[in-house]
Image (spheres, helix red, strand yellow):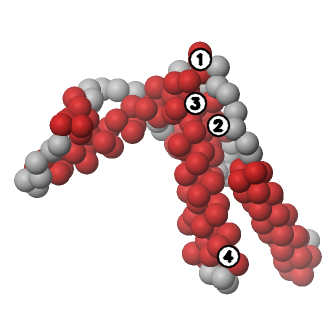
């Protein structure tokens, strides 16, 4: 492929990706309520915030793109992709929610510990975060990316 053809193909793909992002965001915003089976509530509670954050990142990326800040939008697009991968992995992996929950517990524990070390009085509703065991399973995004892309490192 010559340089002109390659450029045209990349521009065509970029338009398709933008169209897909806008369609996904429109679907997200228009989706009504839904019910979650009781057996899937823990998995849902682990995945839904990750999906919501991914969609917020899509919103930010499109906003930046529409303002001509295409390079800056890439950061938000990357975060959206990572969160979408994480959410899909949780949904489709037996016990996947344990690793996301373990990672969130670790983050909460570390934040509260840092606040406490800095002299902050920890309110009772946050003291429980100090009790999360350090050995909980942790989500490993690079491992998930390798699994999804077959080890090609294209993600």
Location of mark 4 (residue): 65
The image quarter in which residue 43 lies: top right
What kind of element bears circle 2? helix
Q: CA distance from mark 2 to mark 1?
A: 19 Å
At label 3, counting other C-alpha atoms closer than 10 Å, the crowd grade (few under 14, some 14-19, many 20 or more) is some
Outermost residue toward the front in this view: 33
Q: Earlier in the sequence, mark 2 or mark 4?
A: 4
Location of mark 3 (residue): 44
Q: CA distance from mark 2 to mark 4?
A: 25 Å
Question: Is 32 displayed left or right of 83 in the figure?
Answer: right
Residue 147 against residue 17 in the figure, above or below? above
What kind of element bears circle 1? helix
Label 2 vs label 1, nearer the camera: 1
* Residue 150 seen from this side: no
Q: Are marks 2 and 1 in contact (CB under 8 Å)?
A: no
State the quadrant of the N terminus: bottom right
Q: Earlier in the sequence, mark 3 or mark 4?
A: 3
The image quarter in which residue 8 lies: bottom right
Question: Is 75 displayed left or right of 24 in the figure?
Answer: left
Q: Nearer the viewer, residue 79 or 8?
A: 79
Location of mark 1 (residue): 38
Location of mark 2 (residue): 88
The image quarter in which residue 73 lies: bottom right
Label 3 vs label 4, nearer the camera: 3
What kind of element bears circle 4? helix
Q: CA distance from mark 3 to mark 4?
A: 31 Å
Q: CA distance from mark 1 to mark 3?
A: 10 Å
Q: Are marks 2 and 3 in contact (CB under 8 Å)?
A: no
Q: Earlier in the sequence, mark 1 or mark 3?
A: 1
- On the image, the x and y values in percent for residue 119 come to 7, 53
Q: Earlier in the sequence, mark 2 or mark 1?
A: 1
């Amino acid at each position: 492929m010559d340089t002109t053809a390659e450029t045209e193909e990349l521009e065509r793909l970029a338009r398709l990706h933008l169209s897909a992002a806008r369609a996904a965001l429109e679907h997200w915003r228009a989706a009504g309520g839904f019910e979650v089976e009781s057996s899937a509530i823990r998995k849902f509670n682990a995945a839904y915030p990750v999906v919501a954050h991914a969609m917020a990142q899509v919103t930010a990326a499109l906003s930046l793109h529409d303002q001509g800040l295409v390079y800056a939008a890439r950061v938000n697009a990357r975060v959206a992709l990572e969160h979408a991968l994480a959410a899909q992995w949780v949904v489709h992996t037996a016990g996947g929610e344990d690793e996301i929950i373990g990672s969130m517990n670790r983050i909460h524990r570390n934040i509260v510990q840092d606040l406490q070390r800095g002299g902050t009085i920890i309110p009772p509703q946050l003291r429980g975060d100090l009790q999360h065991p350090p050995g909980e399973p942790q989500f490993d995004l690079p491992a998930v990316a390798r699994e999804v892309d077959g080890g090609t490192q294209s993600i």
